[in-house]
Image (spheres, rainbow, N blue to C red):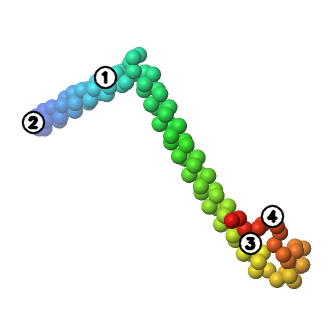
C-alpha cells in the first residue's frame, strides 16, 4: 500500500510543478504583450481585428437580408399574379399588380 501512495504523491508533485511552469510561461507572455512599449501595438491590432470582424458580420447580414427580401417579394408577386380578378375583388384588392411591386431589373 505504501508504494501506491508514493506514486500518487509523485504524480501530484509533477502535475503541480508542470502547472506552475505553464502558468509562469503564460504570465510572462501576457506581461510582455501588455508591456508599455508594446501596449499601443497590441491594442491597435485588437481594434483592427474587431473592426474587420464587425464589417464582415454586417456585410453578411445585409446580404442575407437582401436575399430574404427578394424571396419575399417574389412570393408576394407570384401570389398576386395567381389571383383571379374575382378573388382580388373579394379580398378588396385590385386585380392588377401595384406599381410599387414591379420587379427590379
Q: In the rendering, which numbered label is found on residue 96?
A: none
- Reply above or below: 74 against 24: below
Compute the Cα span from label 2 to label 1: 37 Å
Mark 2 vs mark 3: in front:
3
Q: Name the residue tied to disc 4.
A: 100
Q: Which class describes the residues within 10 Å of circle 4: few (<14), some (14-19), or many (20+)?
A: few
Mark 3 lies on residue: 77
Q: Nearer the viewer, residue 84 or 90?
A: 84
Indicate which disc, 2 or 3, sits on the residue closer to the N terminus.
2
In which quadrant of the rendered image does the C terminus lie? Answer: bottom right
Of callouts 3 and 4, the N-terminal one: 3
The residue that disc 1 covers is 28
Can residue 32 be seen by looking at this rendering?
Answer: yes
Query: Distance between the Cα atoms at labels 2 and 4?
Result: 86 Å
Residue assigned mark 2: 3
Mark 2 to mark 3 CA distance (whole Å): 82 Å
Residue drawn at x 72%, y 75% as measured from the top left: 78
Q: Could you say whether the residue bearing mark 1 is in a helix, strand or loop?
A: helix
Q: Secondary structure at mark 3?
A: helix
The percent coordinates of residue 49 (x first, y second) are 47, 36
* Residue 6 position within the rendered picture, expressed as x and y whole percent measured from the top left: 13, 33
| Marks 3 and 4, how far apart at CA | 11 Å
Mark 3 neighbour class, 10 Å CA radius: few under 14, some 14 to 19, many 20 or more:
some
Amino acid at each position: 500500500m505504501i508504494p501506491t501512495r508514493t506514486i500518487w504523491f509523485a504524480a501530484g508533485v509533477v502535475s503541480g510543478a508542470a502547472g506552475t511552469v505553464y502558468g509562469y510561461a503564460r504570465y510572462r507572455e501576457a506581461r510582455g504583450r501588455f508591456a508599455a512599449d508594446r501596449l499601443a501595438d497590441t491594442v491597435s491590432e485588437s481594434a483592427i481585428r474587431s473592426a474587420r470582424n464587425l464589417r464582415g458580420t454586417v456585410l453578411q447580414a445585409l446580404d442575407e437580408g437582401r436575399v430574404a427580401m427578394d424571396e419575399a417579394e417574389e412570393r408576394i408577386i407570384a401570389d398576386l399574379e395567381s389571383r383571379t380578378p374575382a378573388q382580388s375583388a373579394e379580398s378588396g384588392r385590385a386585380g392588377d399588380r401595384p406599381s410599387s411591386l414591379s420587379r427590379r431589373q
